Image (cartoon, rainbow, N blue to C red):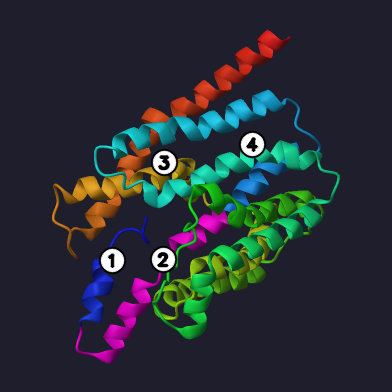
Amino acid sequence: MLSHFDNVYATALKHSSHSLVRDAGYFVANAFDGTSTVIAFFIISGFVIHYPNKNGIPSLTEFWIRRFLRILIPLSVILVAGSWFGHPENAVVWSLYSELIYYALYPLMAKISLSWKTKFLIAYMVAAAVIGVLCFHDIMAFVKQTNTNYHGYYWQLGWYLTWIVGLPCWLLGVLIAEHIDDIKQASYNRVMIYRISVYTISCFCCFAKFHLHLSYILSMNLFALLLYKWLQTEIAYFKTHPANSLLEQLGKFSYSLYLCHPLLYVILKQYITYNTFTYPVFLLLTVACAYGFYLIVEKPGHKFARRITRKYRTAAV
């Protein structure tokens, strides 16, 4: 959300006559990197899908029904609503199309008689080859430090190929699920080192995308390796420590926030002037409306998916 909303404070600071204030403005402008977050989301998704199923999927049909419905019901509502406003949701839904493909392929990948590490390495090499061939323009833009034919975005190959680029990131989550039960607890200091490192490098990736011609499609799959270690450490740490209850509550409607915020941004700007005074209002209203969307659409969608699964199970018996 913060990466997609124009940061009015960064703009104001960058227009200052004082160099330190301007530098602060450049930092704020690169302080929130949404693409890095999506890569972390891919890893988390792979973990969440594989952890309860690493010894086998009890029912393939039930697995697909629940996973597809939980994504498609809220997504369909946003796609319809977004059609009235020029589809601002396109900024985020590309990752969801990749998710749907991963859900479809996961049971098939599970049947391949190779270790998940080997599957990850193969996926990583295939993704690198696709990037090297189809995104050569971004490679040359970085080498020559030029804007000529520079794209910069991770999803530049469209939903039908981006899933290939992101698959190794998703499989990193599967690797965490494979071994997390054997990993000892992590110390708080180690967690903090990873958090600071991840945040710092995400800021650099954002800066490099705009100022060093380092495309996200070149940087993110490398950054994913650090995200993998960080998330693994977080999960190990919270085996023995309580989670922040407020953040857990916010996490329940994070999918709704992800889906809704581009559309809400467009709608709110039609009624509220966007400036340094109203920026916090935009953020609060977006979070509040996303929570409302969760209550009205996403949460009932979850219940519907569970109900359909139960009916299928009963009919099968």
Q: Are marks 2 and 3 in contact (CB under 8 Å)?
A: no
**Residue 20 highlighted magenta (yes or no):** yes
Q: Position of residue 266 (x, y in %)?
A: 24, 49
Q: Quadrant of the N terminus?
A: bottom left
Residue 19's place in the image compared with 34, above or below, is below
Query: What are the residue bounds of the magenta stretch?
Result: 16-41
Indicate which label's residue lies in the foreground, 3 or 4: 4
Q: Reading the chain from its start, which is encountered first: label 2 or label 3? A: 2
Can residue 242 be seen here?
Answer: no
Q: Position of residue 89 (x, y in %)?
A: 36, 46
Q: On the rendered structure, is 218 left or right of 15? A: right
Q: Is residue 26 above or below residue 123?
A: below
What's the distance in space between the residues labelled 3 and 4, CA to CA?
22 Å
Could you tell me the amino acid type at mark 2?
A: Phe
Instruction: Quickly name the residue at label 2.
Output: 32
Q: Quadrant of residue 225?
A: bottom right
Residue bearing the label numbered 4: 104
Magenta segment, prevailing SS (helix, strand or loop)? helix
Question: Left or right of 255: which side holds 290?
Answer: left
In the picture, measured across the screen, residue 150 lies left or right of residue 143, that is left
Dot 3 corresponds to which residue? 256
Q: Secondary structure at mark 3?
A: helix
Residue type at mark 1? Asn
Of the numbered discs 3 and 4, the one sitting upstream in the chain is 4
- What kind of residue is marked 3? Ser
